[in-house]
Image (cartoon, rainbow, N blue to C red):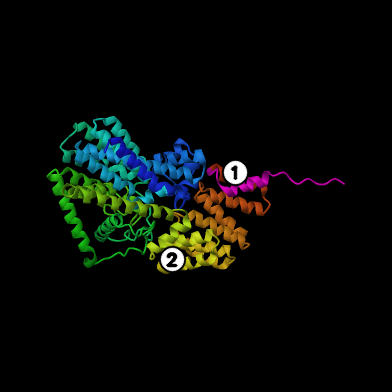
Amino acid sequence: MKERLRVGLLLAVVALVYGNALVNQLVMDDELYIVRNAQVVDPSFHRIFSINPYTNVFRPITFATFALNWAISGAKPFGFHLFNLILHAGVVWLLYILLQELLGSTAEAKTLAFVAALLYAVLPIHTEAVDWAVGRSELLAAGFLIAGWILHLRDRPIASLTCFALALLSKESAVVFFPLVLVSDYAIGKWKPRIWYALEGGLTLAYLTLLFKLQGGHFGQPGINMIDNPLVNLPAGWRILNALRMAWKYVALQIYPAMLSCEYSFNQIPVYRDWRHTIPAALAAVATVGAWIWAVRTRKAGWAIAGAIYFAGFATTANILMPTGSILGERLAYLPSAGLCLLLALGWNWIHLKKEMLAWGLLVVIVLAFSVRTVVRNRDWKDALALFSSGVRAAPNSAKMHANLANAYFLNNQFDLADWEFQTALRIYPDSPETLSSYATLESRRGNYQAALQKMEKALSMAGRNYLDFDAMVVTYAAILMKTNHPDAALVCLNREIAEAPAYAPAWSTRAVLHLSQDDLQAARSDAQAALRLNPTDQIGIRILMRLNAPAPSTPKH
C-alpha cells in the first residue's frame, strides 16, 4: 500500500467515525471552561497566561484555541467539535510518522506503524477526549508532544523544544516528554548530544517550578473532593494499591469498551483496604513492569516503546505519584493508549507473520467493531440529557452521575424526574454540597422556598470558601433570600461575597437585581457595569442595563 493511500485512509477513517459528533452540543464542564471563562470570552494576553480562577489549571494554549473558536462563532458548538476532530486526525497522522521513525523504514515496520495508528484512530475510549470540547487539552498536549518527539529524532532540537513547550502549555501531563525520549533513544540505540537532553530536562524543571509557583506552592487543585476521587483520603500505600487496580480498569475499558461513562466518581468503583482485593492487581502490575524493563534492557524496541508510552502517559494522572482530581477518566487514556495500540499491533504482526489472511481479517473485524462502538458512543455526547442518561446506565452507583442527570432533567423542566435523581444521588453520598445546592435550586423553582433555604444552608455549612462552587452557592442562596422577602439578609450575603470574591461577576449582577427591586437605579447600574467588566457575557448584567437604558414611555398629551 502506498504511503499517501495509508495516510489518506487514516484521515478518512477519523472523519467517518467522528463525523456524527459535529452536531453535538457543549456539555459538562464546557460551560465552566468556555462559556463562563473570561479567558475565552474576553481574552487578553495576561488572562490567557494566568491560572484559571475556577480550577487552578495553567493551560494557555488550550484556552487560546477556545478563544479563537469563540471569536469565530461564539458559543456555537460546531466549530469546537470540528476543531477537535481535526486535532484528533492530526494526532493519528503524527503517531503514524513517529512509529515509523522509531521502528525503522522496513515494510514490516511501516505496516506495524499503520496498524497501530489505525487502531488508535477508532479506539472508543477516545470519544471523551474528542467529543468533549474541554477534552481538547488532551489532543493538543498529545499532538505537540508527538511532534516534538519526531523532531527530536530528526535532529531538530530547537523545533523539538518549541513543540515540547507548546505541549506543556496545553496540559501539564506533557512533562513526560523528557523520560519518553530518553527511553526511546536507548531502546533504538541512537543517542543524541548530551546538551539536547540537558535542554529538555532543564525545560521540564523550569516548567514544573513555574507551575508550582503559579498554583500556590503545590500542584493541581488546592482541594480535591472525595466524591470526585475516593482515593484522596487514603494513606499513600492503600491509595497506590487501589490505583493499580484502576490501572487494570483502564486496560479493560480500552480493549472491551462495552460500557463507557463520563464519570466514575463515588461510589461506582469500590475502594478497598485489604490485601485480598489489592494484592492480585499489584502483583500483575509488578510482573508487567518487570517484563517492560526486560524489553528495555534487551532493546526490544517495539515492546520497550509501547510500554514507555503507556506508563509515562499515565504517570501524572494515575493517582500513584500523588492524588489527582479524578479516580478514573477516559480522556486520560488518550496519550497512553497509543502505547497499547502499538502493543496490539505487535501482537497482530506475530499472527501476520504466520497467517497473513487471518491477521488481516482479524484487523478488519476489530476496526469495524471499534468504529461502530465509537459512532454509537458519539451520540451519547449529543447533549447533557443523553450523556448523563447513558452515564447512569454505565455507572449506576456514581452519586455525581445521578446529580448530573438530575440537573439535566431540571434544565429540561422535568422536575419530578430531577427530584428522584437528586434523592438517589444523596442516598449514595449524603454529604455533597454541590448536590444539595442544585437540589435547593430545584426546590426554589418549584416554590418550596423553606426547603430550598434549608438545603442551601446545609450545603454552605459543608462547603467552605475553598470549595469550587462556593461562590455560585452563595449567590444562589442570596437569590432565594430575595424570593422569600428577606432583602436585607440577601444584601448582607452579597456584600460579604463581593468583599471576599470581588472578581465573581454573578455576585455583582445579582446585587444589581436587588438594587433594582428597591428602585436604587444608580446602584443597580453600577453593579451591572461591574459584572460586565468582569464577564462581558453575564446575561443578568446585560438585561439590567438594557432595562435601565430603555427609553421611558411617553406621556400622552391632553
Discs 1/2, front: 2
Mark 1 residue type? Gln
Q: Is residue 80 above or below residue 514?
A: above
Across and down, in percent, residue 386 comes to: 46, 58
| Image mark for residue 11 | none
Instruction: Report whether 129 appears left or right of 319.
Output: right
Q: Give the image location of residue 376, x and y in percent.
A: 40, 55
Residue tagged by mark 2?
425
Quadrant of the rendered image containing residue 536:
top right
First of labels 1, 2 by sequence position: 2
Q: Is residue 270 something that shows in the picture?
A: yes
Of the 4 image quadrants, the one containing the N terminus is top left
Q: How far apart are the alpha carbons under marks 1 and 2?
A: 38 Å
Residue 551 is a magenta residue: yes
Considering depth in this image, is 357 or 428 the residue closer to the camera?
A: 357
Give the quarter of the image for residue 329: bottom left
The residue where tag 1 is placed is: 529
Task: Classify mark 1: residues with Cα within 10 Å, few (<14), some (14-19) or many (20+).
Answer: many
Q: Which secondary structure, mark 2?
A: helix
Residue at left offset 31%, top offset 54% = 323
* Amino acid type, callout 2: Ala
Magenta part of the chain: 534-558
**Residue closest to the eye, 167 or 352:** 352
Q: Residue at x 41, y 49 (%)?
A: 131
Mark 1 lies on a secondary structure that is helix
Does the rendering let one see residue 210? no
